[in-house]
Amino acid sequence: MTRISDRKVFGGQTAVSLGLLAGALVLGEMFRLQPCYWCNFQRLLYMFLIFFGICGTLFPGGRKLWALLSGLTALGGVIAAGKQSWMQYAPQDAVECGFSDPTLVEQLVDWLGELWPSMFMVTGLCKEKDWVFLGLSLANWSGVCFFVLFCVSLWMLFRRGERRWNDRWAR
C-alpha cells in the first residue's frame, strides 16, 4: 500500500485552505457579499491553516506539532462557523455582533480591519444569509470544510510514523 507523504498532506491542506479563502473572497466580490465579524474571523483561521500547512510541508519532522496546531485551528473554525450558522438560523435568539460590548473576536477583527481593511473590514451583519447553495449558507459550507480539515489533522496526528529502511529489513 502506498503511503501518502506528510509533505503531500500538508501541501494539500495549504492548497485547500488557500482555495477556500480565495473562493470566499471571489464569491464576496461576485455577489457583493458583506463580511461580518465571524466571516472575517474564519478568514483569519484559514490563513493560520495555510501557515501551518506551509510549515508542515517545509518541516515535516514536526508533523505532530503542525497537525495539532492545524487541528485546533480547524476545530476553532468549526466552532466559529457553528456560531455564525446558529445566528443565521435563530436570529431572534442571537445578539447581533457589534451591538453590545465587543467580544474578543470582535476586538481582534476590528484591530485586523485597521491593519488590513481590504481583508478584514466588517461591513455586514452576522445574522444575514446572503448566499445559499444547496440549502446551505456560506457559514454552513465553511463549517463543513473546517470539519474535513479537522478530520485530516486528527488523522495526521495519530497515524503511525514512517518506518525507516533499516527497521524494515531488520525483521
Image: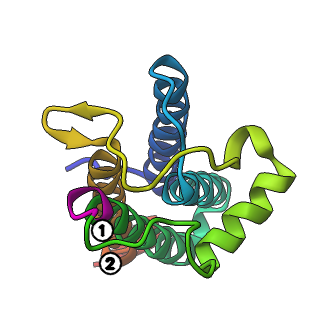
Q: Residue at image x 56%, y 77%? A: 100
Q: Main secondary structure of the magenta part?
A: helix
Q: Are marks 2 and 1 in contact (CB under 8 Å)?
A: yes
Q: Secondary structure at mark 1?
A: helix
Q: Residue at image x 27%, y 43%? A: 137
From the viewer's perspective, is 4 left or right of 116?
left
Q: Residues within 10 Å of mark 1 (few under 14, many from 20)?
A: few
Q: Position of residue 119 (x, y in %)?
A: 70, 42
Outermost left residue: 135
Callout 2 amino acid? Phe
Q: Position of residue 80 (x, y in %)?
A: 42, 67
Instruction: Tell me the magenta residue range.
Output: 87-91
Q: Residue at image x 55%, y 69%? A: 99
Q: Residues within 10 Å of mark 2 (few under 14, many from 20)?
A: few
Q: Which residue is mark 1?
A: 155
Write down the quadrant of residue 104 in the picture.
Answer: bottom right
Callout 1 amino acid? Trp
Which of the numbered marks, if any, corresponds to residue 158? 2
